[in-house]
Amino acid sequence: MKIPSLLRALSIGAVTFLLIGVLVFLYAKSSSVDAEKKTQIEGYLKQLKQLDAEWNVDVLKSRMDINKNYDPLTSPLAVLASLQKKLAEEANALGELEPQKAVGELQRLIDEKTDLVDQFKAQNAILKNSLRYVPTAVDDLQAEIRRTKRSPASTDTLEILSVRANQLLNDVLKYNLLPDSAAAQNIEASLLLIEASESLYPDSIAASARNTLRHTRTILRQRLVESDVLAKIAAMPMSAAIDRVGEVFDRNFQVQLTESDRYRHYLLAYSTFLLALLVYIGARLLRSYRIIGRVNKDLKHANETLEQRVRERTEELSKALRDLKESETQLVQSEKMASLGQMVAGVAHEINTPLAYVRSSLETVESRVTETVREFADATLALVGAMRSGDASDDEVAEKFGAASDLADRMIEFSVIDEIGGLLKDGVHGVDQITKIVINLKNFSRLDRTQITSQSVDACVEDTLQLAKSIIKGRKVTKILGGTTPIRCAPSQINQVLLNLITNAAQATAAESGQITVVTRMRGHQHIAVEVIDNGTGIPEDVIPRIFDPFFTTKAVGKGTGLGLAIVYKIVEQHGGRIMVHSKEGAGTKFTVVLPVAGDEPGSGTTEAPPSERFAIAA
Amino acid sequence: MLMRQLLGITGLALLVTGIPAVGAELDEPIKPLPSDLKLDARKVELGRTLFVDTRFAKDNSVACASCHDFSHGGADPRPRSIGVHGELGGANAPTVFNSGLNFRQTWNGSGASLEDFLERLIKNPKVFGSEWADVVARLRQDRAMAAQFADVYPDGITSKNTIDAIATFVRSLTTPSRFDRFLRGDAGAITTEELQGYNKFKSYGCVACHQGVNVGGNMFQKFGVMGDYFADRGNLTAADLGRYNVTKRDADKFVFKVPSLRNVELTAPYFHDGSAATLEIAVAIMFRYQLGRDAPPEDKALIVKFLKALTGEQLPRLTSAVNQSTDPRTPDAVAARGTKP
């Protein structure tokens, strides 16, 4: 019982875990598109574009000498590096080849551009240096020419040099602003002309001119190099590459979005399923709760009515018990009455015998003694009357005296007085006999069960045997009374027990050969035992277990109630005693009743009013 | 009345900022050093400790400070630096001061950033010759070091954190000079001669390359634009190829990062090859090969005077002002040992 429930709990847990796991998975999948990330990447790209544009502007500013140093051209490097790194991380995080390729391409472009900018700075610095120096160099040259003008031979040459140098300066500065190949060729031609005449110049002028030419050539070269670098920078497809990265990320994002949208649909479906499941479970629970509620209500109701019903049942039971008690009492009474009825004949006979001789005694006294006494009384009265009157003769007196004396003599002679006394004594004896029988009967029939007294069982035996005289008539009855200690009991009930047992013994035996032995003895100090033994037919073995059952009888219908021994059993039980039977078919039966001396409250189990009151009349 | 108020406000600003802001910042090709670096002081201190740590070297022979001598303007007084196992380096170690402001690290710009440079420097067989794993393991054995790291970095000693600490320390090594004050508007911060020198510096074209906040350090330039320096010098070395060693592009041969001229007064010998023993020689070489011209000695002298105005008024120290250690392995001791291997 325990393991299955554990398994059940485990499986429920596992299923719940699985359901939630699927939900979490779907949720994670459906929200895998990080909109914030997308915005972030867009931000990086925007920043990159902005930075690149500013970079371009700064390059031009440097070119135009508006930026006086190259710091603005290097400051984007750190930011560019960090943006590149971030983009590369994002691309790697996606694990897709395309974004990585796009970011890689952008990175390559940025590196290339960085390199171009580095070149620009270097070339621009050289150009700037020469541009700054060329006017000074030309000035220096002019000063030198002025210093060496004294030689007339060289005057023309130097004059031309001076003019050419000024022209050169002009052309170069112009070229710097508007570089075109024609101007370049012009300048180059001037340079060649100056160079061609170099041998004609004094040494100091030649050196100065060489210096000027060197820097002018540097300007020509650097200006082209710089233009080239600037063109390359301008041609850098940075914006396109940045847009391309944006597109790739966006496409990837769209793919993710589609996928996440799909998963969102799954999630929706799954959520619906879960919801349905929950609703189902909820309904189930609700139903269960409703059932439980109903059962609870029923239980509550039952609980409420139970008490009532218990009370009713108790009432019914009490009534039944009462009825049972009543009927039991009635049964006991009727059994008693039945046994009493059986006894009545005997009792009547019993009373009849003393009654007969009381009657004969009284009749004898009446017929014989009454006449004699009346004669004597008459004679005595006549004598006394004669003696008192005085007018009667002595003869008369003597005659009367003689008659009285005769009568007295005769009375003595025939012992009339004694006879009268004897007859009266007999009569009294007879009356005593009857009285005794009546008392016995009254004792026996007393139904007042609450009347517990200390009574010797021996006395009860005596009473019962006396009462049952007619029943046991003819059987040889032996009493072996052990002088037992009086016990606490209801004597009338004990009598009933004894009467029943003795009656049974009598009925089991033939009048001529029957022997009934009643024994009383102490059993230890606490108990007494009464044995009723007969030499009768005995009880068949198969019947013995049922003899104490109510309504069990072996007698003919109408002859016995079947309650005799049941009542005996009940009475003994109520007295806290035991009854045992030993029987052998054809040999006889012995009933042994053991009763405690201290007694048990007979009828203590009932709170009913003693039924004796109701049957007092019957008693 | 209004003027007085304004003056009052300026005075207040003076008190608050501590900067002698007499006038507005000048519009010059050279820009003053940033006054607020916004660095984590704990990282700076940790980096300062690491800067003198010889455990970066495989044989514990050299520390960063061995070549970047703080008593020598943060540069190496030896023409060519000496690394692990006494390996002779290809170039003279440039100053570490203000190097955080350089757009690239090393003479040829091989270090895209300080971090990138440091990462490779430890592995460079001619510098430290170590593996990062070994370095980190060695540092981790040091409980005090581990504790100091744990204070700053939640994940303790890692190569990344070590690099970050050193880089942060290096970025802290700026050296504001009198000229910076001048650029910020304190006209009296430099002498008339220095100012004249500055004007020469500009007019002769030095400033074409040596410009910006670091007076250089923001571009590459060919060494020998107007003349073949290396042919004249002779004994061409691999290091002389400069940026070519990084890009393998012919155009980048002899191209070097334009060095910062801050503290140039202190960092002799000059150039990547340490060939110029004095500032005067260096200036002369520059005139000849870079500017392609000559200048009167008095002009060069004025330029040198100006260059000396770029020296930091307060130079960084290896020992933290708050952390004067009596440990035998003090930074100065290490630095001393490192400089004379």
Image (cartoon, helix red, strand yellow):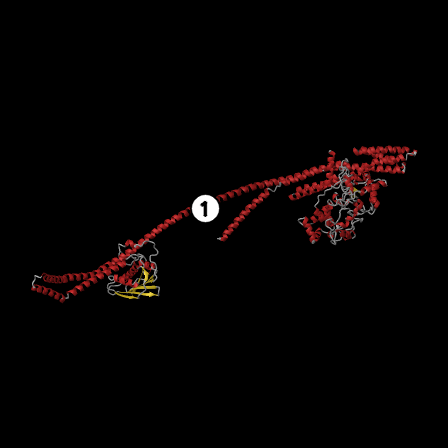
Viewer-side residue, A584 vs A365: A365
Please give left or right for residue A497 compared with residue A191 in the image. left
Q: Quadrant of residue A529?
A: bottom left
The N terminus of chain B lies in quadrant: top right
Give the percent coordinates (x, y) of residue A576.
35, 60
Is residue A389 left or right of A546 when viewed as pictured?
Answer: left
Q: Residues within 10 Å of mark 1 (few under 14, many from 20)?
A: some
To which residue does mark 1 refer?
A292
* Residue at the outermost front position: A390
**Depicted B16 relative to depicted A341: above or below:** above
Q: Quadrant of residue A590?
A: bottom left
> At which x and y percent is residue B102?
75, 43
- Identified at 34% across, 55% down, the residue is A606
Q: How many marks?
A: 1
- A274 or B308, which is in the foreground? B308
Residue A595 spot, x, y in % from top left: 33, 62
Type of amino acid at the residue the image marks with label 1: Ile
Q: Secondary structure at mark 1?
A: helix
Residue A121 visible in the picture: no
Instruction: Please say if A164 is above or below B166.
Output: above
In the foreground, A365 or B326: A365
Q: Chain of mark 1?
A: A
- Residue B291 spot, x, y in % from top left: 82, 40
Residue furthest out toward the bottom: A413
Image position of A507 (left or right of A131): left
Using the rendered image of the protein, determine whether residue A3 is visible from the camera's viewpoint. Answer: yes
Q: In front here: A263 or A301? A: A301
